[in-house]
Structures are given as structure tokens and as C-alpha cells.
Amino acid sequence: MRAPIIAGNWKMNNTPQQAVALIEELKPLLADAPCTVVVCPTFVCLGAAAQALCGSNIHLGAQNMHFKANGAYTGEVSADMLKALGVEYVILGHSERRQYFAETDETVNLKTKMALEHGLIPIVCVGESLQQREQGITAQLVRGQTKAALDGLTADEAQQVVIAYEPIWAIGTGRTATAQDANEVIGIIRGAVAELLGEDTAAALRIQYGGSMNPKNASELMAMPEIDGGLIGGASLKAGDFSAVVHF
Ligand code: 13P
């Protein structure tokens, strides 16, 4: 049985003060959360967020990290630095990073390995663009992204990874994949994990859906057998909406 996990990706929103205010609103609302809950503020908010979350049931995640341990990489942040702040999860390979910041399958794989080496749980994002969906290459694309991200991991390592299926055309657009479509693609992703690392690993690994998930559609999506959680953008920025999604 896979434990559901809902994560809020705050993207480039909230100052440290605003992050703390949002966390203070969320804490009482999520104290009885029926699933694992993670919030992922920007790097500059992580220290303040960690303090605000102390003693709560809400976990802390980052939105990215570098694949090297340390060194001359101006502007980058390492796994060690995240760990030292109390970060437990890290989103890797979000489509916005692939699209705007030259993230590749190869760097996502290096980052996934580095995160696991440092005891961080990677939330690895995969998903197709509208053009790729219309070309009929969704399955091929997500299988390739999944296998590339997990390449070289042992089964034990891979079981700790969370994958987020985020169709790019559904992100921030208000257009959600139907629960059936999301379930089908997530099944394809799980099949790719099984081919690479065996059925047991595929059965244990959690796969979220992300893309305009909100209080209205969360329960239908979460009812699907392959969907183990959500990666929430816009609806994670309002305490009431995020709480409603978490209590799907
Ligand atoms: P929205 O929920 O705003 O569509 O964003 C989804 C997302 O990109 C989460 O990582």
C-alpha cells in the first residue's frame, strides 16, 4: 500500500515573511492531514520555513539543487546545504526548469543520485507538452524521462523516489488531465519503472499527478488507483485551497 503524498510547489512566490505567514495558516488546517504533506518554498525562504514548521507534521522541500557536492558554481545550492536547513524533499526536473533553465534528463539523473546520497527524497517531474501529446508521443516521452531519471539507481534507492507526472499543457492553465488520462499515463510510467527495476519497485514507488489540481478535482484524481498524490502549484498558495486538496 503506497502512502499518499501531496506537495505544494510554491514556485517563485512569497518572501520569507510571507512564507512564514502561510505556514502559520497551514499548520492548524493540516494538523489532521490524512497523507504526507510537503511545502516547497524558494531557497531564500527555507531557513525561516524550517523554523516555522518545527514540531508540525508538514515536511519541507526545495524546488531544485545542484548535482555537484560543492565548488565553483556561482548561484547554485548543494544537497548538503539543503539538508543542513532541515529540508527533506527536493523537486527535480520540473518542466519549468527543463524549459527555461536547460535542465536535461542527464542533469535530472545526476541530481536524483546526489539527492539520494544525501538523504533527500527527490520528487522527479516528467510530462509532455501539448505538441508532444498531439503528436501521440506521450507514452514514449514519459517512459524515456522516467528511465533516464532512475538510470543507475538500485531498487532500494528508486523506491524512495517520488515521481510527479505533470503534463505541461495542464500546468497553470486551469486545464486538468482527466482522471482517466492521468491514471493511464501514470500506469505507463509505473510500467517503465517495472521494466528498469522490477515489479516490486514499481509497486512501491509513489507517483503524483500535477497540473491545475485543485479542491474541485482532487478527490476524483486521488480516487484513481495509480495516482498516489499531487504536486500542487497555484492552489498551494492559499491555505484554504491547499488544505482542501490535502483533505481530498
Ligand atoms: P499548477 O497547479 O499551478 O497547475 O502547477 C502545477 C505544477 O507545476 C506543480 O509543480
Image (cartoon, rainbow, N blue to C red):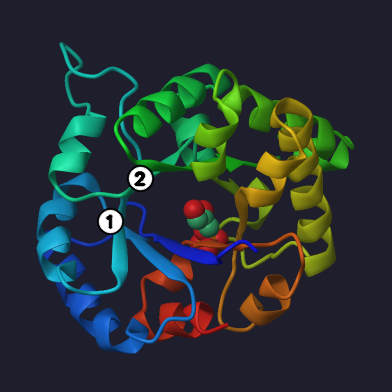
Location of the N terminus (image quadrant): bottom right
**Looking at the image, is 17 positioned above or below residue 162?**
below
Can residue 161 be seen by looking at this rendering?
A: no
| Label 2: element kind | loop
How packed mark 2 is, by other alpha carbons closer than 10 Å (few <14, some 14-19, many 20 or more), is: many
* Frontmost residue, 177 versus 152: 152
Q: CA distance from mark 2 to mark 1?
A: 7 Å
At a point 37% along the width and 62% down the height, the residue shown is: 38
- The answer to whether residue 112 is above or below residue 169 is above
Residue type highlighted by circle 2: Gln
Q: Residue furthest right?
A: 136
Mark 2 residue's CB less than 8 Å from ligand 1 = no
Which x, y percent locates residue 25?
Answer: 24, 84
Q: Amino acid at mark 1?
A: Pro
Q: Is residue 18 left or right of residue 174?
A: left
Q: Are marks 2 and 1 in contact (CB under 8 Å)?
A: yes
- Relative placement, left or right, of 149 versus 138 is left
| Of pointers 2 and 1, the one earlier in the residue sequence | 1
For label 1, the SS is: loop
According to the image, label 1 marks what residue? Answer: 41
Per the image, the residue denoted by label 2 is: 63
Q: Give residue 110's position: percent from left, percent from top.
A: 44, 20
Is residue 200 in view?
yes
Could you tell me which residue is drawn at 13 percent across and 41 percent down?
84
Q: Which mark is residue 213?
A: none
CA neighbours of label 1 inside 10 A, class few (<14), some (14 to 19), many (20+): many
Image quadrant in which you'd find residue 74: top left
